[in-house]
Amino acid sequence: MTVYLDHNATTPVRPEAAEAVAAALTVTGNPSSVHGAGRRARALVEDAREQVAALVGARAEDVIFTSGGTEANNLALINVAEGPIFASAVEHVSVLDGADNVTRIPVDDDGIVDLGALDRLLKDALMKVGAGRALVSVMLANNETGVIQPVRKVAELAAEHDAVFHCDAVQAAGKQDIDFPSLGVHMMTLSAHKIGGPPGVGALIVAPGHQATAAIRGGGQERSRRGGTENISGIAGFGRAAEAATADIEHLRGLASLRDRMEDEIAAAVPGVRIFARGRDRLPTTSCLTMPGVSSETQVMAFDLDGIAVSAGAACSSGKVSPSHVLAAMGADEDEIKSAIRVSLGWTTTAEDIEKFTAAWTRLHARVGGGSLAA
């Protein structure tokens, strides 16, 4: 059986979510229809809206269902018209490449956003006549390193400069408590398949009073904020996954002890290993670490042959293993970037999984590690 340690790419579908998807597929009716069949379909969507909202302490009416986190991020970015967009240099590519006018906010060696730099960028933007209202996009937790950003402080800066604030919470949801109203954000992105729901469905949460411009128009669905007939089965699965993730949050928090034990054993075995953002506030389920002298691609393939699934970073490049923009922004050197992998735990992870990975990591390094990867 495969040891699956790539939950940040996608986490296995929870049984409750799979059951909800299957049940929803038997419901015939368009949620926009007013007859009984349509009302039954509508009830599934609205029940899920309540469940997803509860995951982050939001209002159900502020949830816009989308096709996933990428669409939700793109939808957030189009809501600034012609204004400047400032995004942390470690954001997901769907933010960094989501518009033509994105300026990257630098981060420190642990990947924490530079608040001073953001302040200067916002001040400069205010001085430009006709620049439009700025948008700031800073994720709650990074998908490659797990590092948690000072979102409330970012929100305070954004408010000082009358900027719109968007937060990608795709990786953080279900792994830490999130209270949408108290964070001070205008928009927040969520994705079903990161919390045990089906792929192909996500949400953008929009704060009361903040208007969201539709990117997909026609039909008036989602209160005219996202056109197109709703993905009923996917949404139903998203709702049940959100409910299950909320109930399971303490279990995921507890995985930090397994992650830390793995890092301690590997660091003790190979002193030259770098564990990114170790000692900083991180998700309990994420570790990004190097294997000196062994390329990320070689590691991923070797672990796969050993029945262990890990990744070389974000799973958003159509299967390609490409250098991490996140680690580059953190100042990692070429060898570190080329030899880094991400190990991400989730609701199915066991102590035995971590023991198997640690043993496999140590064997692989003993066999082929220790050299240089510099060109």
Image (spheres, helix red, strand yellow):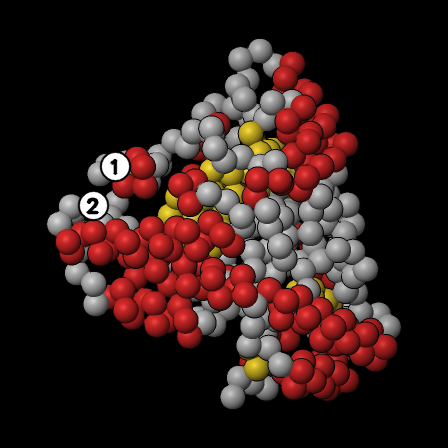
In the picture as drawn, the residue positioned furthest to the left comes out as 35
Percent of width and height locating residue 87: 60, 38
> Dividing the image into 4 quarters, which one contains the C terminus?
bottom right
SS class, disc 2 = loop
**Distance of mark 1 from mark 2, alpha carbons?**
9 Å
SS class, disc 1 = loop
**Is residue 132 rendered to the left or right of residue 197?**
right
Point out the tag, 1 or 2, that comes first from the N-terminus. 2
Residue displayed at 37% across by 71% down:
18
- Nearest the viewer among 287 and 244 is 244
**Is residue 166 rendered to the left or right of residue 286?**
left
- What residue type is disc 1 on? Gly
- For residue 338, which quarter of the picture? bottom right
Residue displayed at 80% across by 69% down:
273
Percent of width and height locating residue 305: 56, 85
The correct choice, above or below, for 182 with respect to 68 in the image is above
Residue displayed at 64% across by 27% down:
159
Q: Looking at the image, can residue 329 be seen?
A: no
Return the residue at label 2.
Answer: 32
Return the residue at label 1.
Answer: 220
- What residue type is disc 2 on? Ser
In this rendering, the label closer to the viewer, 1 or 2: 2
- For residue 211, which quarter of the picture? top left
- Mark number for residue 8? none
The answer to whether the residues at label 1 and label 2 have Cβ atoms under 8 Å apart is yes
- For residue 103, which quarter of the picture? top right
Percent of width and height locating residue 293: 75, 72
Q: Looking at the image, can residue 114 be seen?
A: yes
